[in-house]
Amino acid sequence: MAKKRIDLDIDKYQNMVKNYHEESDRAAAVLAGSFIEEFLRIFLRDQLRDDPVVDEMLEGYGPLATFSARIDILYAMGNIDKAIRSDLNFIRKIRNHFAHHPEQTSFDESPIRDFCSNLSTAKIGIDQNGKQHVPPNDRRLHYLLAIGMIVGQIHNAMLKEKTKKLPNNNGIVE
């Protein structure tokens, strides 16, 4: 039997952000990266047929079980654009580097520093006069902002999808 679909819950995101601020750079990067990976799984699950085969594809050794596979399939399906795909791939690289390199302890060390400079959020917060409103060297903040922007966009897409799936007055889903 297929698993019950899980709603994308913004409260879970807010709880993750609270925990993020209490963690070391390494723990924060892995926590937030894993959160967005699971968020993508939930979003993808909702886009696909309600069938146990789909659940198998999304878990364990399934073809859609990895962070990179989820990014690529959501891009291929048109659910995310190139900019989000790029940010997600840098988020994935940051999370994986922290998880697999025990000597890496900071967002300010290479290659994490370089990955963060490629996030779209490294370029935001600059007004038309060139004044920076988001500290340019706060790579940890740019990482969290990138995740937050993507979570917001996916959450909005899910809400739009849910309203499309509501039955009309005759009980027919259009």
Image: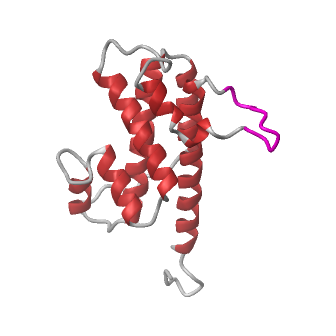
Spot occupied by residue 72 in the image (x, y as percentages of width and height)? 34, 55
Spot occupied by residue 62 in the image (x, y as percentages of width and height)? 19, 51
Spot occupied by residue 56 in the image (x, y as percentages of width and height)? 21, 54
Q: Is residue 26 above or below residue 172?
A: above
The residue at the far left in this view is 61
Q: Residue at x 63, y 39 (%)?
A: 123
Q: Is residue 130 magenta?
A: yes
133 on left or right of 171: right
The residue at the far front in this view is 130
Q: Residue at x 60, y 28 (%)?
A: 141
Q: Is residue 152 magenta?
A: no
Q: Would you say residue 63 is visible in this rendering? A: yes
Pick the front one: 68 or 10: 68
Q: Residue at x 49, y 84 (%)?
A: 172
Q: Main secondary structure of the magenta part?
A: loop
Q: Would you say residue 7 is visible in this rendering? A: no
Q: Is residue 14 above or below residue 62?
A: above
Spot occupied by residue 108 in the image (x, y as percentages of width and height)? 50, 18
- Magenta-drawn segment: 126-135
Q: Residue at x 44, y 66 (%)?
A: 78
The residue at the far bottom in this view is 170
Q: Is residue 92 above or below residue 18?
A: below
148 on left or right of 32: right
For the image shown, how many numbered marks are present on the structure?
0
Q: Quadrant of the N terminus?
A: bottom left
The part of the image, by quadrant, that contains residue 168 is bottom right
